[in-house]
Amino acid sequence: MNHRHNRSGLTRRQLIKGIGAASLLPLMGSAPFAIGGQNAGRVLVVGGGFGGATAAKYLKRANPAIEVILIEPNETFYTCPFSNLHLGGLRQMDAIAHGYAELEDRYGVRVIHATAEDVDADAHQVTLSTGRKLDYDRLVLSPGIDMRWNALEGYDEEAAEKAPHAWKAGTQTELLRSQLEAMDDGGTFVMVAPANPFRCPPGPYERASLVANYLAQYKPKSKVLILDAKDNFSKQGLFTAGWERLYGDRIEWVGLSNDGRVTRVDADRLEVETEFGTVHRADVLNVIPPQKAGWIAERAGVTDDSGWVPVKAETFESRQVADIYVVGDATVAAPMPKSGFCANGQAKVVAAAIAASLESRPAPEAYWTNTCYSLVGPEYGISVAGVYRVQDGVIAEVEGAGGLSPADASDATRALEAEYAVGWYNAICQDTWGTPLGGRAT
Amino acid sequence: MRPARPTHHDAARRRLLRGMVAAIAAIGLATPALAEGPWQRLDAARSVLGDAEPNTQGLVLDLPHVSEDGASVALTVGFDGELADDDYISRIDLFATANPSPEIATFHLTPLSGKPEISTRVRLNETQQVIAIATSHQGERFATAREVRITVSGCLMRNGGDQPEPLSNPRVSVPSSFTAGQPEAVRTLINHPMETGLREGADGEVVPRHIIERFTVSLNGETAFEAELHQSISASPYLLFYLSPDESGEALFEWQDDTGNSATHEASIQAG
Ligand SMILES: Cc1cc2nc3c(=O)[nH]c(=O)nc-3n(C[C@H](O)[C@H](O)[C@H](O)COP(=O)(O)OP(=O)(O)OC[C@H]3O[C@@H](n4cnc5c(N)ncnc54)[C@H](O)[C@@H]3O)c2cc1C
């Protein structure tokens, strides 16, 4: 297929179509001519997670004439949100599984189950694991995170088979759950938590909570120890108060200033060593290592030396490579956290920006919201919300908007927030894949 | 999943930038290495520099581009530039240009420090330039600066939390043995609130300044490394630096705070 593009986003085919190409040039940039019909442009979306699936759907909603191809190796996507409930024995894997049928059947997204292996930004071309090459007018990358193997001494892919990270949901989640189930009563679940930035700032602490909840019921002599490379973490006051209330001293947290930073992992012996030489032995060892943008981002040339992707705040187009838009955890979007909610919101901004740019219109103004629910117990929810806008070219949190759950809320309020968390999960999955409550392909 | 193949984009971009710097130098800036820097606009930095024009090559400041917790930003300063054979870096100053008081720390190094490279954690109130100035024993001066964006997100909102007990839990990690002439990293950490004197407590009153002001390391009674610390060092000061002892013996680590209290830690050193 000949699908070369030019800077305005029109394909060469469109340019040559019928009229002399030269006479078109003065018109470009002003009138959205020749758009619509079957030649509205082609967008490839890499990654069918929170960011990618949302971008694909909302591109089609913005303009059904845009050809949208979603590239995702897996037929079933397991969400990290609520994977901590599986670890805690509160939800089956099926109930966090989502498929792509709705995107294909209802919205007309073409889904190819393959891995994007390379990006040639000059040629506007992506090479798939099948060997196939696809041209694009615009490319969206939402590859999520990859682990920085060996950034933590002793922690590589092989070690993750013994000391799972479970920071991508799926087999890693099931492995950690089976280790927890096999653990003897009286054992210690040790979690190694990373420094900022990383996927889902409150995630480790929700996990510790739901593991403690499981232990309290089934292995009451067991403990949770969190060794943290930070002194402060998300919703810290709310978590610590919740832990005291529900679990007494079952959860112990050791922060950076008290030698909580782990510098070496021995996955065979289930031991970790901290910076000042304390060795902790685990019965189940969960290592959440330092992270970076999914590797395809580096291959596309959009990452900087931090390992993450700097983007233009208004559109989430790469600051380094034209016509590549990046959303979700892979980006530097602070103060927005790396959350599924943010990935979903960023993807909508990107869909609108791409639809506009393919018609040579300016992108609409962007703003975002985020709410992170965490379950401290099955009936004890807490949350933090934020609103974000572009200020002086960077993303900024709108002061006075959003905030935390009250510190002194009643049990009834905490129980309501736990219900809202389930409502949030169903709603965002419905919005992203069209399948709430783990309907694989309905 | 197959591991990422390294891309050449970054290297190419760096080459390009270096080329540009060279080109600018060629078209007539008489002393390109002495270009204007933020240190000229900061009194505290100028008082270290005096009349000297600093060399902008050789001193390297490593900080994240973006930090989500301004209360604790990891910083490393190191020197890999050129010096005369009998010269060494004897002092490094750090400044936070937009903090209420810009001094972060002054480090005094000796030949026993071995390698001029220090890591610590600093407080940065807002997005700003951080400056490092190095002075050699013979008076050569080097300067560099890095911009850090601070975005404290609501999702990471701090809750105050418990203040650590001042001067408690001194921790030191020294290598089990040193080889003569080979500097090795030494890490230290001690609990201390490092109250800036700018914060309001729960009662609405300003919490008085209370910080560790001086940290000294001596080897067999001889000062090897010294740090003057200011409010812009994070709570529970962390310092990573190098030592290059020429003989075995005792290392003494001492932290002194502004109330006159101090804590010490001893370690025996094997060198051969
Ligand atoms: C334990 C845990 C709990 C969490 N809880 C919450 C929560 O309650 N609320 C919340 O908002 N967020 C939560 N998150 C965060 C959330 O999971 C992420 O922020 C979100 O998944 C980011 O979306 P993304 O699109 O960037 O990446 P992902 O959702 O990970 O999607 C990336 C997709 O890209 C695919 N991919 C990668 N490389 C390629 C390639 N080369 N070719 C093709 N496809 C590729 C992957 O297969 C994957 O499907 C949690 C995370 C964890 C770990």
Image (tube, rainbow, N blue to C red):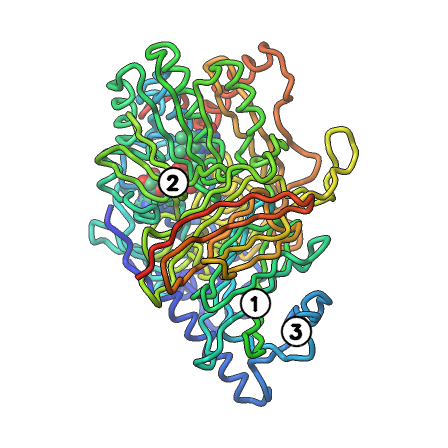
Circle 3 sits on which residue? B49
The dot on residue A274 is 2
Q: Secondary structure at mark 1?
A: strand
- Judging depth in this view, the residue of A208 and A251 nearest the camera is A251
> What's the distance in space between the residues labelled 2 and 1, CA to CA?
30 Å
Confirm if mark 2 falls within 8 A of ligand 1. no
Residue B247 screen position, x and y as percent: 37, 62
The chain letter for the residue carrying disc 2 is A
Q: Secondary structure at mark 2?
A: strand
The dot on residue B166 is none
The chain letter for the residue carrying disc 3 is B
Figure quarter occupied by ligand 1: top left
Which quarter of the figure is the C terminus of chain A placed in? top left
Q: Are marks 3 and 1 on the same chain?
A: yes
- Judging depth in this view, the residue of B139 and B8 nearest the camera is B139
- Judging depth in this view, the residue of A227 and B1 nearest the camera is A227
The dot on residue B91 is 1
* Mark closest to the chain's N terminus, 3 or 1: 3
User: Residue A16 falls in which quadrant of the image?
Assistant: bottom left
Which amino acid type is marked by label 3? Leu
The chain letter for the residue carrying disc 1 is B
